[in-house]
Image (cartoon, rainbow, N blue to C red):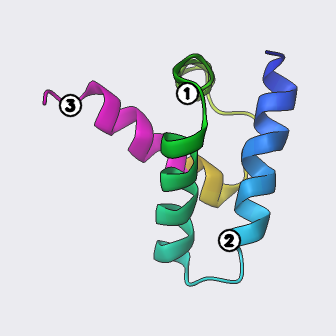
């Protein structure tokens, strides 16, 4: 999938959660991406994050960092 489209989709999820308190918004975005995005999409987002995360909203960026950290953590 095109990374610009993926960033746009992630930021659209954040737009939904922006009215929530920041911590709830970050958790909501993280949860949504974990539950509904294909593992390949999550991996691509993680790779984009490693490259700097250009274009990601601040809340999206925080949620992506949590996803990335959780994916790297041993079970």
Name the residue rendered at 63%, 23% in the picture. 41
* Sequence-first disc among 3 and 2: 2
Magenta: predominant secondary structure element?
helix
Which is more foreground, mark 3 or mark 1?
1
**Secondary structure of the residue carrying numbered label 2:** helix
Residue 24, given in percent of the width and then of the height, sits at 49, 75
The residue that mark 3 highlights is: 73
Does the residue at mark 2 contact the one at mark 1 (Cβ under 8 Å)? Answer: no
Q: Quadrant of the N terminus?
A: top right
Left or right relative to 17: residue 72 = left
Left or right relative to 63: residue 55 = right
Vertical position of residue 51 compared to residue 27: above or below: above
The residue that mark 2 highlights is: 17
Vertical position of residue 44 compared to residue 35: above or below: above
Residue 14, given in percent of the width and then of the height, sits at 71, 60
Residue 3, given in percent of the width and then of the height, sits at 79, 21
**Residue 55: in sight, yes or no?**
no
Question: Magenta region: which residues?
Answer: 62-75
The residue that mark 1 highlights is: 42
Asked whether residue 67 is drawn in magenta, I would say yes
The mark found on residue 3 in the picture is none
- Distance of label 3 from label 2 (alpha carbons): 26 Å
Name the residue rendered at 59%, 41% in the picture. 36
């Amino acid at each position: 999938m095109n990374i610009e489209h993926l960033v746009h989709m992630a930021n659209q999820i954040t737009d939904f959660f922006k009215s929530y308190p920041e911590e709830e918004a970050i958790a909501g975005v993280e949860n949504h991406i974990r539950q509904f995005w294909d593992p390949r999409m999550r991996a691509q987002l993680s790779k984009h994050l490693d490259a700097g995360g250009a274009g990601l909203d601040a809340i999206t960026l925080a949620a992506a960092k949590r996803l990335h950290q959780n994916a790297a953590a041993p079970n």
